[in-house]
Amino acid sequence: MVVDFDAELWVWDARRGDSWVFVSLPEEASEDIRELADGPRRGFGSVRVRATVGGSTWTTSIFPGERGYVLPLKRPVRTAEGLDVGDVATVSVELLDL
């Protein structure tokens, strides 16, 4: 399953000092992933993915949360793509372990 979407970068309030920046997957896609990921999962209910933003592609995990599934965007990716909190990124997420 591949999910392509545009989303605004936001900071996780609980870890503001650590600069944890995320984008939220669309609600419908999050619901579909929850159904596919039903059953035992790895840490925090995470799902392994291959993510692409601009020219950057990396393997990471998405995590379930209040906003549906969220994708962390590490500083090197944000820097390479010229993105900051509040910017809108075009994102592609390919599920790897479902």
Image: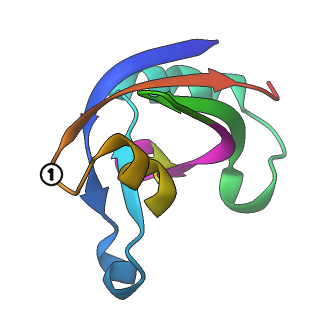
Q: Residue furthest bottom?
A: 17
In this rendering, the answer to whether 17 lies above or below 40 is below
Question: What is the count of numbered marks?
Answer: 1
Task: Look at 42% across and 41% down and name the residue there.
Answer: 68
Name the residue at 45% across, 62% down.
75
On the picture, is 30 further left or further right than 96? left
Q: Main secondary structure of the magenta part?
A: strand
Image quarter in which the N terminus is found: top right
Image side of residue 92 versus residue 34, left or right: left
Q: Nearer the viewer, residue 14 or 9?
A: 9
- Does the rendering let one see residue 74? no
Would you place residue 93 above or below residue 73 in this image? above
Q: At 46% from the left edge and 52% from the top edge, which residue is drawn?
A: 73
Which residue is the extreme one toward the top? 1
Determine whether the residue tagged by mark 1 lies in a helix, strand or loop: loop
Tag 1 residue = 86
Q: Over which residues does the magenta segment extend?
A: 58-69
Q: Residue furthest left?
A: 86
Residue 67 percent coordinates (x, y): 34, 47
- Left or right for 18, reference 48: left
Horizontal and vertical percent for residue 37? 72, 31
Q: Nearer the viewer, residue 54 or 72?
A: 54
Query: Which percent across, then down, holds residue 20?
Result: 42, 69
Question: To which quarter of the image does residue 93 belong?
Answer: top right
The correct choice, above or below, for 49 with respect to 46 in the image is: above
Instruction: Give the quarter of the figure containing the C terminus.
Output: top right
Task: Kindly tell me whether residue 24 is visible in this rendering.
Answer: yes
Q: Residue placed at 27% from the left, 48% from the top?
A: 83
Q: Position of residue 33 (x, y in %)?
A: 59, 26
